[in-house]
């Protein structure tokens, strides 16, 4: 259930920050699943990108949008609680890419 909140939060953020296209790519790499969520929204500045995971942090361009600054903090915590990792890259006015890697259950 919590992992579903990760996807919902990332897609909701893309919509909230003006993305008109959202691409979700999934692939299996060794014993992990990699999920990439890419959008063409307003993007995040290079100097703000490291702080997006901080609790209650709101970037300059996001202050006019609704939210408390907890979403990405909770996303990262949930991914880490599932023994996964999440990274973000972004270009202003071009969009943001979140990549999540989660271990697959042994079969």
Image (cartoon, grey):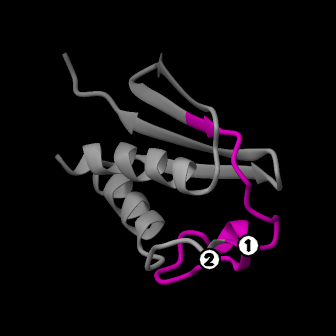
> What residue is rendered at 64% in x and 75% in y?
51
> What residue is rendered at 48% in x and 29% in y?
34
Q: Position of residue 35 (x, y in %)?
A: 48, 31
Q: Badge 1 is on which residue? A: 48
Q: Dominant secondary structure of the magenta stretch?
A: loop
Considering the numbered disc 2 on the image, is that residue within a helix, a strand or a loop?
loop
Q: Nearer the viewer, residue 105 or 87?
A: 87
Work out how far the residue at label 2 is from the one at label 1, CA to CA, in angstroms.
Answer: 16 Å
Q: Badge 2 is on which residue? A: 64
Q: What's drawn in magenta, residue-wise?
A: 37-61
Q: Nearer the viewer, residue 22 or 33?
A: 22
**Does 47 sit above or below residue 9?**
below
Q: Is 83 one of the magenta-colored residues? A: no
**Does 53 sit above or below residue 21?**
below
**Does 8 sit above or below residue 72?**
above
Q: Position of residue 69 (x, y in %)?
A: 48, 77
Q: Is 59 one of the magenta-colored residues? A: yes
Q: Is 57 placed left or right of 73 in the picture?
A: right
> What residue is rendered at 47% in x and 49% in y?
10
> 10 Å neighbourhood of mark 2: few (<14), some, or many (≥20)?
few
> What residue is rendered at 48% in x and 84% in y?
56
Q: Position of residue 52 (x, y in %)?
A: 60, 69
Considering the numbered disc 1 on the image, is that residue within a helix, a strand or a loop?
loop
């Amino acid at each position: 259930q919590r992992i579903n909140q990760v996807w919902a939060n990332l897609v909701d953020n893309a919509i909230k920050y003006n993305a008109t296209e959202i691409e979700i790519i999934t692939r299996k790499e060794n014993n992990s699943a990699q999920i990439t969520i890419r959008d063409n929204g307003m993007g995040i500045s290079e100097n703000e990108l490291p702080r997006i995971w901080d609790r209650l942090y709101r970037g300059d361009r996001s202050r006019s949008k609704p939210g408390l600054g907890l979403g990405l903090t909770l996303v990262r915590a949930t991914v880490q609680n599932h023994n996964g990792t999440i990274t973000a890259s972004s270009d202003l006015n071009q969009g943001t890419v979140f990549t999540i890697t989660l271990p697959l259950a042994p079969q």
